[in-house]
Amino acid sequence: MAGKEEDATEGTPSEQADLVDVFYAQFVRPLGNLVILFAQAEAAWLQLVAGLTGCTEKEAQRFLQMKGPNAKQEIIPLAQTSGIEGFDLQELSESIEKYYCDRERRHRLMHDEWYVSLLQAVGVPRTRGLPRKKGAAVVWGDSTPDDIWKLALRFREYENLFSYVTYDVQQRKKAPS
C-alpha cells in the first residue's frame, strides 16, 4: 500500500516513527495530548459563552474575537444573571482567569520556535517567541515534558467545568419559573 507500512506479522499498519529530532522525542506525547485537550476545552468554552449569551456558537466565536482578552470580564456578569452564584460562581470566575493564562502558555508552546540550546543547558529543548509588537521583548521558554502534561491536565479540567456549567445553565433555562 502506498503511504503505509504493513506489519508483516499481523497485517496491520505499523506505528509511524516520530519525525522530530531525538532531542524533542520526550515532548511528542505531552504536546499531542495538549493539542487535543486544549481543542476540547476551547469547544466547551465556546459552548459556555453561547449558552450564557443566548447566541449561536458562531456568534459566540465572533463575540470572543471582537472582545479579545476582555471577553472574560463580560462572561462573569452573564453567569450571575443566569443564576450561578456562591462557590460555583467563584470557581468559574477563577477558572476563566486561569484558563486565559494557560491558553497563552499553550499558544507559546504551539507557535514559538523550538530549538536545542547550544549555549546554556546544552542539548535542552527550548522555545523562542519573536515579538510581534514594536518594542516587545523576545519570549524565551524552558518547558519540561512534565510541565506540558500538567498544562494538558488543566485543559481537561477546564473542559469538564465549562461543560458542567453549560449543562447547569441549560437546565436552569428549562426549569419552570
Image: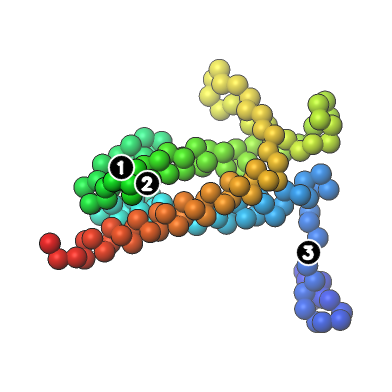
Is disc 2 placed on a helix, strand or loop? Answer: helix
**Cα gap from disc 1 to disc 2, whole angstroms:** 8 Å
Is disc 3 placed on a helix, strand or loop? Answer: loop
Q: Nearer the viewer, mark 3 or mark 2?
A: 2
**Which residue in the structure is indicated by mark 2?**
92
**Cα gap from disc 1 to disc 3, whole angstroms:** 45 Å
Q: Residue furthest front?
A: 87
Could you say which quadrant of the image residue 75 lies in?
A: top left
Q: Position of residue 139 (x, y in %)?
A: 63, 28
Q: How is the image coloured?
A: rainbow
Q: Nearer the viewer, residue 52 or 115?
A: 52
Indicate left or right for 113 with 45 as reference.
right
Q: Residue furthest right?
A: 8
> Residue shown at 47%/43% (left/top)?
99
Could you say which quadrant of the image residue 90 lies in?
A: top left
Precedes in sequence: disc 1 or disc 3: 3
**Which residue in the structure is indicated by mark 3?**
16
Q: Does the image show residue 56?
A: no
Q: Position of residue 91 (x, y in %)?
A: 38, 45
Within-10-Å neighbours for mark 3: few <14, some 14–19, many 20+: few
